[in-house]
Image (cartoon, rainbow, N blue to C red):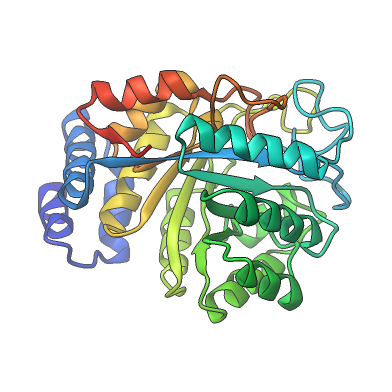
Amino acid sequence: MIKKIINKALKEQDLKRDEVLDLFKSRSNEDVAKIFEAAAELRDSKSKKIKLTSTVHLTNVCKVTPKCKYCGFAAKTSSEGYYHSFFKTQDEILNAVRSVEKSGIPRVSCSGAHGYNGKHAVEATRIVKENTSLELLVNVGADLNVKSLEELAKYGTDTICCNLETVNMELFNDLKPGERLKDRINVCTMINDAHLELSSGLLIGIGESYQDRVNHLFFLKKFPALAEIPIMGFNPYKDTPMEKHPPCSLIEQMKTIAITRLMFNDLRVTVPTPTIGPENVKFSLRAGADNLATVIPDQYPLDVKGVGSPTYGNLREVVNSVKELGLTPEM
């Protein structure tokens, strides 16, 4: 059965919900290995280039109340994360993105906390686009409105990310009591309707079922502008309400990456280095990922804490991992 589903995916035929669920339920080492191999084969058939994306975190002063139960990014949420409040100045943003461009990384993500209606994202976009040739992803979640989207488009933002994280309403409300799922869906819809490139992904290992993941992936099919799906494995941040929740296993992250690739053969499948762990980057590539995020060059001028984990991928080490697998880092 699994072989038949894989062959269907390799022919780039649409998989049905029950077929995707069967892939998630695969248990034998042989079947799981076949899923990984097929996903990597499908990716390689399109391109063996791996996109690298760096990051600039604009502010951690988040106005969402109460805070998300797993968050270690917002001020005062975790002693391991960005505990002290910050707002990056224009000069700090400029110096950071120039160091990214100088390193050869082609793409940068500018992300920040909620409560600004996208104004901080617009200002960062202006700085990036007026001073560098970097591709730009903006990620401030649901903290956008029609005006800020219009300004992001005016400055030439390449991609806008709004992660739903889970489409299980009960789970979302429990883990993110200060937000509403419908607000995030609405922002994704606005991005899509504005004909801007949408990035939206899954946070896994937070208590969701395989059926929840299937529902989430099929929900994303509703957005024609969808171009990128981040797969983020949960890691507990110290001092948060989910401090003792177990981290998402590597095998579950690889399985979700691979199945996402088999469903969406033409899209970027993104893996942030903090969520999978910098030491495990090669495993995400073996599962079909083609974009590695939060890649930081040696001369980066700002302190960085990974979102989802305080660690992150060093550029030299990430490039070596990509090349070891016979793939080409896009520089």
Q: As drawn, is 320 to the left or to the right of 102?
A: left
On the image, the x and y values in percent for residue 203 come to 55, 45
On the image, the x and y values in percent for residue 252 come to 41, 35
Residue at image coords 52%, 61% = 158
On the image, the x and y values in percent for residue 330 come to 35, 39
On the image, the x and y values in percent for residue 321 come to 33, 22
Residue at image coords 55%, 53% = 136
Residue at image coords 53%, 58% = 200
Total number of numbered discs in the rendering: 0
**Position of 79 relative to 33 (above/below):** above
Q: As drawn, is 30 to the left or to the right of 257?
A: left
Quarter-of-image position of residue 160: bottom right
Residue at image coords 79%, 29% = 82
**Position of 82 relative to 97 (above/below):** above
Along the viewing direction, whichever of 141 and 175 lies nearer the viewer: 141
Which residue lies most toward the bottom here? 193
**Position of 297 relative to 105 (above/below):** above
Q: Is residue 40 visible?
A: yes
Along the viewing direction, whichever of 160 and 281 lies nearer the viewer: 160
Q: As drawn, is 275 to the left or to the right of 172?
A: left
Q: Quadrant of the C terminus?
A: top left
Q: Is residue 205 visible?
A: no
